[in-house]
Amino acid sequence: MAYVSKRYRAAVATPGYEKHKRYDIGSALGVLENFPKPKFDETVELAVRLGIDPKKSDQMVRGSVSLPKGIGKSRSVIVFAEGEAAAEAEAAGADEIGGEDLAKRIQDGWTDFDVCIAHPSMMKVAGKLGRILGPQGKMPSPKSGTVTPQVGQAVTEFKAGKVEFRADSGGIVHVPVGKRSFPADDLEANISHFVEHLRGLKPSAVKGAYIRKVSVSATMTPALTLDII
């Protein structure tokens, strides 16, 4: 029998929680608020199961979006840029900026950052890092807004709460939508905004139901299924 923690047992006993119930966003956040709280401010995450075949390139769903209420976390951002673009990145608050030197640090095992941005002219350098950054979801990509000539603007946006997302091998998109300390209205605004953004990314090759299941949870809580299709 799988081990079930005392905290989890307390959570599933929370009034209003039903494992198989579909909640409207407001009701789900009300139950989430009543789950036992740890000593740290948990991240609230959305998981969306899509009706796609992620093995097919014409059905892959990925991108980035600025959430209206941010995500409540300062994100570390590195940038591959030189010259004027590097100066723009520095002015915008990038944590690390470089070229071959930065690539070597990553090749040597350093990946202690959240977002990697690259000026198009530097993809000849950053492009070598796919095997390292790809599995971590940190590889710069035009589709996610992390390969761009406007590196300063990109740094500002990602530090302010812009998030990247990509469907995993099971066709599920995971994305942080804030902290548990956020007002419920702010979490609801972020959730609604993300789901609508995701709807707009439906690949033309996908037939039938696109958004199949949406659930919300905090770091150490059970998931609540939302009544969103």
Image: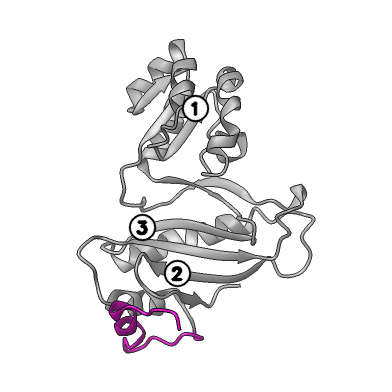
Could you tell whether 185 is left or right of 107 in the image?
left
Q: Residue at x 45, y 69 (%)?
A: 216
At which x and y percent is residue 197? Answer: 56, 55
Identify residue for label 1.
Answer: 107
- Residue kind at label 2, given as amino acid type: Val
Q: Residue at x 41, y 40 (%)?
A: 114
Identify residue for label 2.
Answer: 216
At which x and y percent is residue 53? Answer: 73, 59
Query: Between marks 3 and 2, how big is the CA–CA gap?
Result: 11 Å
Q: Is residue 145 visible?
A: no
Could you tell whether 144 is left or right of 88 in the image?
right
Tell me: residue 211, above or below residue 97: below
- Residue kind at label 3, given as amino acid type: Gly
Could you tell whether 156 is left or right of 118 in the image?
left
Identify residue for label 3.
Answer: 178
Q: Any magenta on residue 17?
A: yes
Mark in the foreground, 1 or 2 = 1
Q: Tell me where the magenta segment starts and ends, as one range.
A: 1-21
